[in-house]
Amino acid sequence: MKKILLGLLVVVVALVAVVVIKTKGFKSKQIVAADGKRKDVAIDSAAVAHLSDAIKMRTISYDDTAMMVQATYDSFFTFLKTTYPLVFEKLGDTIINQRSMLLTWNGKNTTSKPVIYYAHLDVVPIEETTLKEWKHDAFSGDVAEGYIWGRGTLDDKGAVISLMEAANKLLAKGFTPERTVYFAFGSDEEAGGMQGAAKVAEYFKAQGTKFEFYIDEGGLVSTGLVPNIERPVALIGTAEKGYITLELSVNMPGGHSSRPPRETAMDVLVAAVKKLHDNPDQHTISEPVDEFLQYVGPEMKSPFNAVFANRWLFKPLIMKEYEKSAEGYALLRTTEVATVFNAGVKENLIPTQVSAKVNYRVLTGQTTKDVIQNAKDIIEDPRVIVTPREVSEPSKHSNSSTYGFQLLQKTAAEVFPDAIVTPFLMIGSTDSKHFQDITENTYRFLPVRMEPEQVRSIHGINEKVGVKDYMETISFFEVMLTNLK
Ligand SMILES: [Zn+2]
């Protein structure tokens, strides 16, 4: 008995020792200690007016791209040309597939691979029923209460105009980037990017151009998004989940609802959807999420830092904590959710043909092929036909050892010295998926500070960007172009 107790004690002491040693060795990965003060930024009123003007132009995206108004895009390009004449004098400009614009800024070193900064010109429509809830009209571009208001201020015209402002400022100083830089402005990100980003990527593929990296919208700078961290966090998306929608369809005899068969097409469909819901994917900490934990962990207070330093021991605890929020749950697995049912036309008629759509977001390390097979295995019913729609694989993981990430981290640390900078996994989808073949490295970062309320305003009501925050975004692009080697 004594021996067993003694043995147990040795194990506990050893465990504690390992935990302590691991915690001691769990060093901050921040370049600048993230306790600096926020920098003061001067307000450039001309830059504010330019974003305000850009918001007024209704470059609205529709799933049916035939509904998109060409004239609005044409006027947007004219607006860019008249607002930034120096940029158009020094950079080459090309229109791709009528509504996307590509600007080429030749660098000093033509042997280095070029880089792309991407942003999209289109915005989502405003729901009629929410019009009255906007404090300032959605397309007013009003400047009030320290904000610029309107659809696109955050997603994503703010980035388009910030890039133009940054280039304009640098050109005025006679600056030339070290390597060639492309600005690509896509036209239909909100509708899948097939007419915009996909065409831009095809254009480069046809030329055989390969890029060092690609940067798109994605993570942001915010407080309160990461549990146990009080300081602002700059989230740089180093990977993005994949996307697939499975259409489930069932075709069975229908008829009069007064004499229903024991099982109808609708019953079979509902059972299949329920089975998928009841069998979620196993949780796991994928590579990009583990890297995120390595970056945020050392910035936490005790005992949380010890928990994150010892993921080998506390992994189940960490996963349990993260799974409490919808975002955290989505970081740890491939998610599925039923989004559309197409069934029935009349209350007294049993439908013959019914279908549903189940949308999946695929975790890094899995493939959409796995998702299809898993779904079929779970449903286990040959009467349910499973058809994949809208397929895109999870992105590669552009980890923190890459040049692009280090450049982003350095720049973010310089511009947001009060923030913790970290890689993370994007659970949403961006246009970056179209660029996977022309670069190994894709990052998703919109260098804007946002309050949680602003994060919710994206695709919602009262979208607005802080005037000072917008100044920082311009500064971010300026510093990043200067830091680019
Ligand atoms: Zn966007």
Image (cartoon, helix red, strand yellow):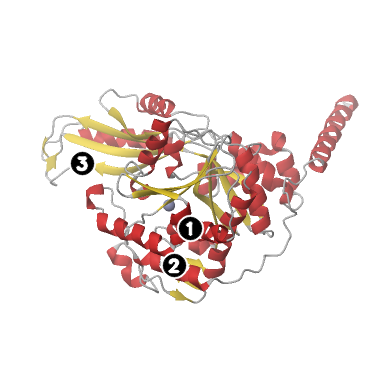
Q: Position of residue 276 (x, y in %)?
A: 39, 34
Disc 2 target residue: 50
Using the rendered image of the protein, determine whether residue 69 is visible from the camera's viewpoint. Answer: no
- Callout 1 amino acid: Met
Considering every residue shown, the one lying at the far bottom of the view is 145
Q: Quadrant of the N terminus?
A: top right
302 sits to left or right of 225:
right
- Callout 2 amino acid: His
Which one is earlier in the sequence, the residue at label 3 or at label 2?
Answer: 2
238 sits to left or right of 160:
right
Q: Are marks 1 and 2 in contact (CB under 8 Å)?
A: yes
Q: Kindly indicate the quadrant of the structure image that contains residue 230.
A: bottom right
Q: Nearer the viewer, mark 3 or mark 2?
A: 2
Q: Is residue 252 above or below residue 357?
A: above
Q: Residue at x 85, y 32 (%)?
A: 14
Q: Is residue 296 above or below residue 6?
A: below
Task: Report how far apart the C-alphas of labels 3 and 2 lie in the structure.
Answer: 48 Å
Which one is earlier in the sequence, the residue at label 1 or at label 3?
Answer: 1
SS state under label 2: helix
Disc 3 target residue: 343
Disc 1 target residue: 164
